[in-house]
Image: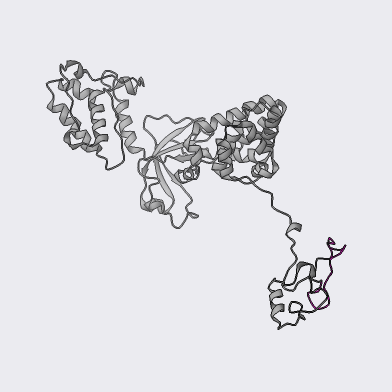
């Protein structure tokens, strides 16, 4: 540069109010790269020479901070949800194994972290996929790391918690409930390959797993400690509601409703004792009390009157089912409707008898103003000996049933009332 060693407009003393000084303080230096000195002020300009590569001669400019990012410990990269999905969709298994063994991809870091339920299902599916690889050494290394890491504990915890998942939990576990069989098949596949590749390690792991299952049976929905006294069929039981949530009132809830089914056990459900709630008065509930009744024909086993029991309440309201089951229990085989399907559990549905008496069958499109779905159900009910029609509220099931009955009554000449009504309506 022609002005090296001379003062010009770019080489102005470093006074605080100077415009050039303010620009330097903002991180901008108008001087040539080779003319910037250590002090950033007058008389400290360096002539390019043998010391250009000296790391200790970097210079200092006001307003700039040393960059220590390279000296900080970086957090290990962890494989994400989308990367797992992409690997599962990849048909090249050997390429998948390379990615999983690559430390920069972060798969092993992922196995050591806390995973969501969907992530657990995806990892299990991915591990099952690499079991088809011909490179035993590579897949053995991955499977062994997965089994010995915290991931195996998370899978165990995930499996034991499936039995008590409610609808809200299932919303956060869509990948499992989307295809239940696929998950269990993947678990079996991984276990078989792990057992074949590392038989000694798998035996150690199996023993630990069995011990874990033995002592990790999850609690059921409603568990309370009660005692059954001698010589009675109805029993008042006492609950502790003192620690209940203030927002949840048992008096106004659907729990402990009249007729609700209760199950008692004192040996982890090896033997069962069933009862029903026969009284749930408000004053009893306020005191944490319920009246439980047992069937008059039930034989209470001896020796149970002074034991503690687990009580489990059914989520489904039992009373309507109880009335239906009582009627079915009192029927004889000769008068039992649809015995072929309900008792014998036959799945091949026969046509009703009245169709064999019809000489001419004509077609018609959507009678009674039925929509397409209703019309399909209408035809199924009239052409099958046994048909089940279901649907959400407001879809016209009652309307459809009335028109099925109307059609059968108006065509009583084609079939006898007895055969037609017995086979279709019951």
Q: Is residue 25 above or below residue 134?
A: below
Q: How many marks?
A: 0
Question: Residue 152: x, y in percent?
Answer: 64, 38
Residue 415 vs residue 187: left or right? left
Which residue extends farthest front?
A: 2
Of residues 262 and 18, the one drawn nearer to the viewer in this rendering: 18
Q: Main secondary structure of the magenta part?
A: loop
Residue at the spot 69% in from the left edge and 49% down from the top edge: 76
Q: Quadrant of residue 22?
A: bottom right
Residue 30 vs residue 351: left or right? right
Q: Quadrant of residue 136?
A: top right
Q: Is residue 8 visible?
A: yes
Residue at the spot 54% in from the left edge and 40% down from the top edge: 161
Q: Is residue 204 visible?
A: no
Q: Is residue 45 magenta?
A: yes
Residue 336 vs residue 145: left or right? left
Magenta region = 38-57
Question: Residue 81: x, y in percent?
Answer: 57, 44
Q: Is residue 245 magenta?
A: no
Of residues 203 and 149, the one drawn nearer to the viewer in this rendering: 149
Residue at the spot 79% in from the left edge and 67% down from the top edge: 34
| Quadrant for the N terminus in the image | bottom right
Q: Quadrant of residue 70?
A: bottom right
Q: Is residue 135 above or below residue 276?
A: above
Q: Is residue 394 above or below residue 50?
A: above
Question: Residue 341: x, y in percent?
Answer: 33, 22
């Amino acid at each position: 540069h022609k002005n090296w060693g001379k003062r010009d407009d770019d080489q102005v003393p470093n006074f605080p109010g100077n415009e050039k000084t303010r620009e330097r303080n903002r991180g901008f230096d108008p001087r040539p790269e080779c003319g910037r000195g250590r002090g950033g002020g007058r008389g400290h300009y360096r002539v390019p020479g043998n010391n250009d590569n000296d790391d200790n001669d970097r210079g200092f400019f006001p307003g700039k901070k040393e960059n220590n990012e390279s000296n900080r410990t970086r957090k290990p990269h962890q494989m994400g949800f989308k990367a797992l999905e992409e690997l599962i969709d990849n048909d090249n298994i050997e390429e998948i194994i390379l990615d999983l063994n690559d430390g920069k991809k972060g798969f092993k870091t992922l196995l050591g972290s806390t995973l969501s339920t969907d992530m657990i299902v995806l990892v299990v599916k991915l591990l099952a996929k690499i079991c088809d690889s011909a490179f035993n050494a590579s897949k053995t290394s991955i499977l062994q790391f997965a089994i010995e890491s915290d991931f195996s504990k998370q899978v165990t915890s995930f499996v034991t918690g499936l039995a008590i998942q409610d609808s809200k939990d299932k919303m956060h576990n869509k990948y499992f409930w989307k295809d239940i069989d696929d998950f269990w098949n993947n678990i079996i596949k991984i276990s078989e390959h792990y057992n074949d590749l590392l038989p000694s390690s798998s035996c150690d792991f199996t023993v630990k797993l069995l011990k874990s299952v033995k002592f990790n049976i999850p609690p059921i929905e409603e568990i309370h400690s009660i005692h059954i006294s001698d010589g009675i069929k109805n029993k008042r039981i006492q609950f502790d509601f003192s620690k209940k949530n203030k927002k949840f009132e048992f008096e106004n809830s659907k729990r402990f409703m009249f007729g609700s089914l209760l199950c008692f056990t004192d040996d982890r459900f090896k033997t069962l004792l069933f009862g029903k709630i026969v009284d749930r008065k408000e004053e009893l509930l306020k005191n944490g009390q319920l009246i439980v009744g047992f069937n008059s024909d039930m034989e209470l086993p001896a020796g149970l009157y002074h034991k503690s029991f687990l009580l489990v309440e059914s989520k489904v309201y039992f009373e309507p089912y109880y009335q239906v089951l009582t009627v079915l229990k009192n029927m004889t085989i000769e008068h039992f409707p649809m015995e072929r399907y309900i008792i014998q559990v036959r799945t091949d549905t026969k046509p009703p008898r009245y169709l064999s008496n019809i000489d001419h069958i004509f077609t018609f499109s959507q009678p009674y103003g039925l929509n397409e779905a209703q019309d399909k159900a209408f035809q199924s009910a009239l052409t099958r000996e046994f048909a089940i029609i279901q649907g959400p509220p407001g879809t016209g099931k009652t309307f459809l049933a009335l028109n099925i009955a109307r059609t059968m009554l108006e065509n009583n000449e084609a079939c006898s009332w007895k055969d037609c009504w017995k086979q279709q309506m019951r």
